[in-house]
Image (cartoon, rainbow, N blue to C red):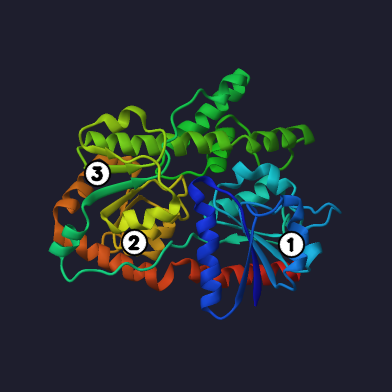
Amino acid sequence: MRTALIKGQSRYGLLRCFVDDVAAGIAARGDEAVVLDLTEFALEDLGARLKAAGPVDLVLSFNICSDYRDPKGRTIFEITGAPHVTHFVDHPLHHLGRLNATPRDAAVLFVDHSHVRAIPKLFGPDRFAYAGFCPHGALGEPAPMPADAALFCAERPIALLFAGTCYPREPSLLDQFPEHVKALFGAAIEAAWAADWLPALDALDKALAAFGMNPDGAGLSREERDGIAALRNLAYIIDDRVRVGRRLRLLEDAAQAGLPLTIVGENYGDLVRRPNVDYRGTVRTDEIPLLMRQSRMVLNANANFGEGSHERPLTAMLAGAVAASDFSTFYDDEFDSGAEIVLFRWSKLDADLDVLKALLADSEALFGVAQAGREAVAARHRWQHRVDTYYAAARAAARHA
């Protein structure tokens, strides 16, 4: 199997690290990976670079190039004869333009089961040759673990790490909409905010039903269907509001609870002036596993992926730290909560933060969870473990292209 991986630019170099780890995983199994780095040539030359790379069985990219056309208007499938798989690590609502321009012969993968369900709602049935679920993998190598809890704590001076951007609250786009649309989206945001987990499109549909409209019901006029489609395309507003608000709430509540927070990332403002917060500025993704190896616990807000993954908990566990994240069905299915990972719920955040504080004070229990989590991720959840999913998506796309 020979795979071409397209490597672009990304914030903190995150997606570039994903490409590197997947390429290493492909090579480790005896297959060939060819990395095409868009920082080294112009995008319009990608098609020529793919041709020059020789025959490939799969072209893989993260978030980018699913909509690529060369100067002759050919898609990646038409250029190479190989299926193109794009792994989207954000909600598809944030990639509507790109997905609308993605050819039907492509395969698309998502990091949350609700994102897969969103595709037919947003684009209609059978829009792509294949659409499926593929979680993140952990970055880096398994950390060596010490012999006992005392050494574990001594070697890890950071008690609780949070790594990520703080998205400040901004004026709402809803202010530009008519009152009835603002009321509808306000109800959807309220429903999503009130639940431990409610996907943005489901929250919108719940609000539509409360306003007397069955969004998928029979008998809708063409105008009504078009109106619902337009509203669904705006549901990223709901996703943004919940994602941004919950991350900020988590950090504010954790700081208020007196947890010893070390934070790396952007836009933290007044939060970092608290005496129990050690703010270290912005770091690149390739530096994060080392910081996690110096940490006993890593705190995560799962980007509103309630049925999926984020890279942070998996990387933290592989680095030998305890991962503490909001509840996701993926984590609940894949790990023993309380023994391999620690999950909190938004509906009882204050009480669950007290649980985290107690665990940080119990070095033996902390060490036990860290050890078990590391073993679970090393065995099943590194990027090398996602290669079979990429190959399967490519085969499915080839059958249906």
Vertical arrangement, residue 226 with respect to residue 156, above or below: above
User: Which numbered mark, 1 or 3, is in the foreground of this view?
Assistant: 1
Residue with the mark numbered 3: 353
Q: Looking at the picture, how far across and down is residue 303, in whole percent?
A: 45, 45
Secondary structure found at label 3 = helix
Q: Residues within 10 Å of mark 2 (few under 14, many from 20)?
A: many
Q: Residue furthest front?
A: 40
Chain-order first, disc 1 or disc 3: 1
Q: Quadrant of the N terminus?
A: bottom right
Vertical arrangement, residue 33 with respect to residue 105, above or below: below
Q: Which mark is residue 317?
A: 2
Q: Looking at the picture, how far across and down is residue 393, in whole percent?
A: 64, 67
Q: Residues within 10 Å of mark 1 (few under 14, many from 20)?
A: some
Q: CA distance from mark 1 to mark 2?
A: 37 Å
Chain-order first, disc 2 or disc 3: 2
Q: Residue furthest right?
A: 72
Q: Quadrant of the C terminus?
A: bottom right
Q: In the rendered structure, are the residues bearing label 1 and label 3 in contact, judged by CB atoms less than 8 Å apart?
A: no
In the image: residue 31, left or right of residue 306? right
Does the rendering let one see residue 401? no
Q: CA distance from mark 1 to mark 3?
A: 51 Å
